[in-house]
Image (cartoon, rainbow, N blue to C red):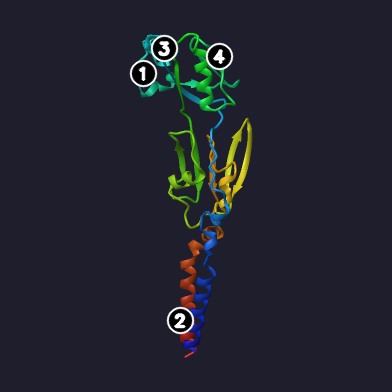
Amino acid sequence: MRIKIYYLFTAFLLVAVLSSCASRKSFLYLQDSESVPSKVDLYGGLLEPDDNLLITVTADEPELASPYNLMFLNARSTETTTARNTELLTYLVDEKGEIDFPVLGKIKVAGITRSEVEDKIKLLLKPYLNNPGVNVRIMNFKISVLGEVKTPGRQSISGERITLLEAIAAAGDLTVYGKRNNIMLLREEAGVRTIAEIDITATDFINSPYYFLSRNDVVYVQPNKTRINSSVIGPNLTVGISAISLLITIISLTTR
């Protein structure tokens, strides 16, 4: 009788282990890659209100370009440029999508790309400067990655583009409990919030508008059923196994 109970207990554990096995398709990224075209589209994010821009103007005569730079104006106002007041050196895009540029006044920048802003300001400066050069950098490119990743949190991007896979890699990749076929992405564009569901196990997602992330995007990796179930039974699992072992021992002793 004791041997029979032992085999029953072993079979129970074996069934429990086998039932928890997952398919490879639940873990592999970018499946069926041969069916996706290899063409890479150029990407340029559009500027929006509340963007923070660092704009530098150069010219053949540097002293003539100085009044068009906030750094020069900041120095003239006897302010000391330190890490604490670097915001004085940037332009905040207002609710109308404009920046207040030295000498030139209000310039509409929302709705166009960074490079288009450079060309626009350069054109406006040509009557005043010989061979003007304009460099624009976006200083507030941040995204957030939450949920079932190894290091969730906010990420600051030094460039002007990042892919969803790069953001996941920067967060230490998904844990084994993350749902790879239903990643949620929260995005706000032109005052409209949208939530998209993305399957990174399907390679064709690289052609979607969510392959490249936008500023302030929030990526949320949902937990799979194993994680959800373990959160319920996890604390009680050890107690349950101990109780089953005790019960088997009692039955074995009483059936001798």
Q: Mark 4 points at which residue?
A: 106
As displayed, is residue 215 above or below residue 32? above
Please state the horizontal and vertical placement of residue 63, each as a whole percent of the image: 37, 9
Question: Mark 4, residues whose alpha carbon is within 10 Å: few (<14), some, or many (≥20)?
Answer: few
On residue 153, the disc is none
Q: Residue at x 47, y 47 (%)?
A: 168
Q: Which residue is drawn at 59% across and 38% down?
A: 187
In this rendering, the label closer to the viewer, 4 or 1: 4
In this rendering, the label closer to the viewer, 4 or 2: 4
| Distance from the alpha carbon under mark 4 to that under mark 1 | 24 Å
| Distance from the alpha carbon under mark 4 to that under mark 2 | 83 Å
Ranked by sequence position, the earlier of labels 4 and 1 is 1
Q: Mark 3 points at which residue?
A: 65
Q: Mark 1 points at which residue?
A: 81
Helix, strand or loop at mark 4: strand
| Distance from the alpha carbon under mark 3 to that under mark 1 | 19 Å
Q: Name the residue under label 2.
A: 249
Please state the horizontal and vertical placement of residue 117, each as a whole percent of the image: 53, 22
